[in-house]
Amino acid sequence: MTITNPIKIVVVGGSFAGIAVINTLLSALGPSSKNIEITLIERRDARHHSLGAFRALINEEFHSQIWVPYTSLFPKDSPHKVIQGQLSEVHHGYIVLGTGQSIAFDYLTLCTGSSNPAPAKFNVDFSKEAIEITNKTREDIKKSNNIVIIGGGACGVEMSGEIKTAFPEKTVTLIHASGTLIDYPGYADKLKSTALTHLQALGVDVVLNERITIEGLDYNNAIQVAPRTIHTKAGKTIESDMQFLAVGIQVDTSYMSTLRPPENSNFDPQTIINEGTHTIKVQKTFQVVGFDHIFAVGDCSDFSKVPTAAACTYTGPTVAKNILALIEADTKNKKAKLVKGSGPPAIMCLATGPTTGVTHLPLFGAKFHNFFSRAFKSKDLMIGLSTAAMNIK
Ligand SMILES: Cc1cc2nc3c(=O)[nH]c(=O)nc-3n(C[C@H](O)[C@H](O)[C@H](O)COP(=O)(O)OP(=O)(O)OC[C@H]3O[C@@H](n4cnc5c(N)ncnc54)[C@H](O)[C@@H]3O)c2cc1C
């Protein structure tokens, strides 16, 4: 392959995966950058530390920390840059942003992640808009007495725990469609049952095996303030004045629909997208199937069965190493030795308040309650990891 001078690496999406790729590249390249120019394309003006979203919901002071600016990501006077913009088309050798701007690349990494209903993640371009939504929701929570959360995955468990811990006098009900909370593949039953007893001990009312739909409460309108009486099929009546939908992770990879190999205009890009999840199909090296110089990693790729930030810290650096190996091989016209990625073990730490949580370490078959969870995650929801990764002192 003919590569340009300087060599252009483009990373799209500046969150857990994208920043892990960039930081591994930066530390391997050193200050000289060896004639390589990295460009981060990110739709937002700041990085959202999603792990802290529910603490921000009840703690205004914490809120200011979960949006981390990109201003210190790259060393000053380096050739690297951040462009705020939304990827809308991927082509062989260049991408196009929503503004129509074209950006050429030699190596591209797609890290566009996933979305969850607000207030877990936000479909906004400016942090200010997300902060306004969270501030309003915090005020609404304060005024409500009976809060219902639908969906007992990790988000529903953490959100109900945070709200109940901050406001023990309010009734918080978590309704889940299946018989176990956090029913993700690969995670131990012990974690799921411990999460249930833990929430019950906090005082959250957990209702299992009830698939509830509330008119108007959907993915794009996931926070509602209205008096509602909910009837379960088991005959329970739940009064509520505020409702949250904590169900559904969505992946938008529609920008791939323009991608074709140069020699094959009949190529159907849908063949490299998973039908149900819309994740991008990747090889074990994180190269998009059929495209050696395009990588996808993090929640937007189909590498991990359960998409997590923890997985990004394992997989992002592998992508960076493979890009560097390809550059070396391409410049010397030889075959690259690429590394295959591996994910982390199915560790899960659920924070249910500043001092409480449930952790499961499958390596030792061990489960931990508050002490370990507080030290590992609950106290500050790992905000330090994101600020350090973005070089914020
Ligand atoms: C409330 C909550 C708590 C969580 N807690 C944990 C936890 O404790 N541990 C854990 O391991 N995981 C946790 N997760 C999961 C974790 O947040 C995700 O797995 C992680 O964010 C994935 O990182 P990512 O970089 O792949 O994508 P994302 O974090 O989704 O980031 C994608 C980035 O790409 C940008 N982007 C998207 N589309 C475009 C586009 N078209 N053009 C330009 N930019 C674009 C976005 O603005 C965003 O910055 C949690 C998730 C939530 C919602």
Image (cartoon, rainbow, N blue to C red):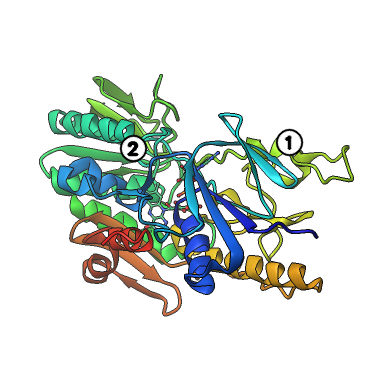
Residue marked by disc 2: 127
Q: CA distance from mark 1 to mark 2?
A: 29 Å
Can you identify the residue that label 1 sits on? 258
Residue 236 visible somewhere in the drawing: no
Disc 1: CA contacts within 10 A as few (<14), some (14-19) or many (>=20):
some
Q: Is residue 271 left or right of residue 199?
A: right
Residue 185 in the image, given as x and y percentages of width and height: 54, 58
User: What residue lies at 22% left-to-right and 25% top-to-bottom?
Assistant: 241
The amino acid on which the numbered mark 1 sits, given as a three-letter code, is Thr
Query: So how many labels did they put on this image?
Result: 2
Is residue 6 depicted above or below 152 in this figure? below
Ligand 1 contact, mark 1 (Cβ < 8 Å): no
- The foreground one among 383 and 364 is 383
Give whichever of 272, 68 is nearer the camera: 68
The picture places residue 336, in percent across and down from the top left corner, at 75, 72
Callout 2 amino acid: Ser
Q: Nearer the viewer, residue 359 or 92?
A: 92
Which part of the image, by quadrant, shows the N terminus?
Answer: bottom right
| Pointer 2 local density, CA inside 10 Å: few below 14, some 14–19, many at least 20 | some
Q: Residue at x 23, y 65 (%)?
A: 374
Q: Quadrant of residue 296?
A: bottom right
Query: Relative to the observer, which residue lies in front, 279 or 235?
Result: 279
Quadrant where the C terminus is found in the figure: bottom left
Residue that extends furthest to the bottom in the rendered view of this protein: 364
Element type where label 1 sits in the image: helix
